[in-house]
Amino acid sequence: MKKLRKVRQTLGCTAVIILMLSPAVAQQSIAQLQARFDHENNSVKKAKMLVKLGDAEFADARRAGREGDNNTVGFTMEKYRDNVRAAFEALKKQHPDAEKHSNGYRQMEMQVKQGIREVEDSMLAAPAPYKPPLQIVRQDLIAMDEEMIRLLFPHRPADSKPNPPSGEKQP
């Protein structure tokens, strides 16, 4: 019985220590991912790294939101938007024809859709004074997403105008 109690106490203490250290580990992970992202020269790899970095940033923003730290939520979402912009600009520079070289663009487009949802969720939970910066981030992400769609699908049927009617009458 005493051994069982001793094991439970040890496991309990270990669990508490792990929970206390997990935010620091997550922060270090974001810092490491950010450093790798910043130093990556290949735009497709940068776009793929954005998925991991974005997921880590979203987790950090959700944690900060639960703790009521709305400044951190806003800062994290703005940093995410800046990372999206950097990866997108690198893709446009290295692979201007998204229709032929779509890999990085597709990765980013899916990630940006998730980012828009995360920002919208943060906006719902944020007090009124913190919403305007999040609205700007949301608008920027939507604009980049729309541009990615136009680059990926330049000949969409919705963009083409119907042919003007010819001289013949239709019955």
Image (cartoon, rainbow, N blue to C red):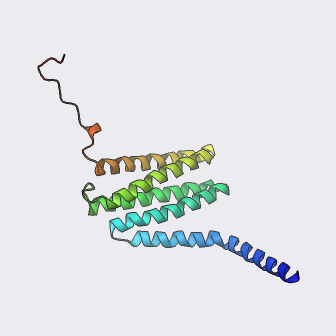
Quadrant of the snapshot with the N terminus: bottom right
Please state if 163 lies on the left or on the right of 152 as rendered.
Answer: left
For image coordinates 51% across by 45% down, the residue present is 135
Instruction: Please state the total of marks drawn on the protein image.
Output: 0
Query: Can residue 133 be seen at all in this image of the molecule?
Result: no
Res 65 quadrant in image: bottom right
Res 99 quadrant in image: bottom left
Query: Can residue 157 be seen at all in this image of the molecule?
Result: yes
For image coordinates 60% across by 73% down, the residue present is 25
Please state if 127 lies on the left or on the right of 40 as rendered.
Answer: right
**Which residue is most to the right?**
1
**Relative to 155, does residue 109 appear above or below in the rendering?**
below
For image coordinates 39% across by 47% down, the residue present is 143
**Relative to 164, does residue 23 appear above or below in the rendering?**
below
**Which residue is most to the left?**
167
Residue 100 image offset from top left, x and y in percent: 24, 57
Res 169 quadrant in image: top left
Residue 153 image offset from top left, x and y in percent: 28, 48
Which is more toward the observer, 153 or 40?
Answer: 153
For image coordinates 58% across by 56% down, the residue present is 73
Which is more toward the observer, 169 or 93?
Answer: 169
Residue 9 image offset from top left, x and y in percent: 81, 77
**Relative to 60, does residue 114 appear above or below in the rendering?**
above
Quadrant of the snapshot with the C terminus: top left
Residue 24 image offset from top left, x and y in percent: 62, 72
